[in-house]
Image: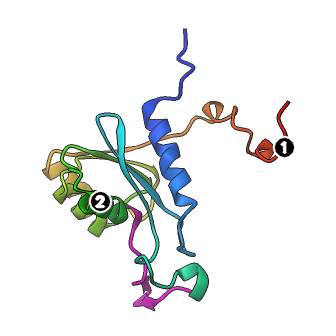
Amino acid sequence: MTDKRIPWDQYFMAQALLLSLRSTCTRLEVGATLVRDRRIIAGGYNGSVSGDTHCIDDGCYLVDGHCIRTIHAEMNAILQCAKLGISTEGAEIYVTHFPCLQCTKALLQAGVKTIHYLHNYHNDPYGLELIEQVGGSVRQVELEPHYFEKLSFGQLNEEQP
């Protein structure tokens, strides 16, 4: 008998995808879900500091080809834990795109040892080396469409019988 329930890795990645829809970045929409003991402890998406102008409103603030206005999704998830006093030691992260080197270092320093990602995105060789050095792991998640067929977003606003 096949398991009809969505596997944990796809469930948590779907949460990260949902979070990415809140992104205020015009260059790449990223979402991240921090998980410990199969429980979501925080989520984040890339965007501006609360109260600042958003890139979707005023454009990116580019310096040397990088938007300095945006806080990455992974950092926002870690910062949410810091703000609320939630430990990230031993947590896992599900992120829509492979983390940049700075986010990889921050995740490892925060005690996150397992990084699950959906899309390759400038996968940094040194970041991969660091993950291995600290005994962490990284894994690409593939979403299986049949788990999402039940979703009928087109019918959300229609009256149900």
Which quarter of the figure has residue 55? bottom right
Residue under pointer 2: 78
Instruction: Name the image quarter holding the N terminus.
Output: top right
Spot occupied by residue 34 in the image (x, y as percentages of width and height):
35, 49
Query: Type of residue at label 1?
Result: Glu
Q: Nearer the viewer, mark 2 or mark 1?
A: 1
Query: Type of residue at label 2?
Result: Ile
How many numbered discs? 2
Nearest the viewer among 40 and 73 is 40
**Is 130 displayed left or right of 9 in the figure?**
left
| Neighbourhood count class around disc 2 (C-alpha, 10 Å): few under 14, some 14–19, many 20 upward | many
Spot occupied by residue 53 in the image (x, y as percentages of width and height):
50, 85
Dot 2 or dot 1, earlier in sequence: 2
Residue at mark 2 to residue at mark 1: CA–CA distance: 38 Å
The question of residue 41 being in magenta is answered with no
Q: Secondary structure at mark 2?
A: helix
**Which residue is situated farthest in the top direction here?**
1
Residue under pointer 1: 158
| Neighbourhood count class around disc 1 (C-alpha, 10 Å): few under 14, some 14–19, many 20 upward | few
**Is 149 displayed left or right of 115 in the figure?**
right
Residue 100 higher or lower than 86, as above or below: below
* Magenta residue span: 59-73
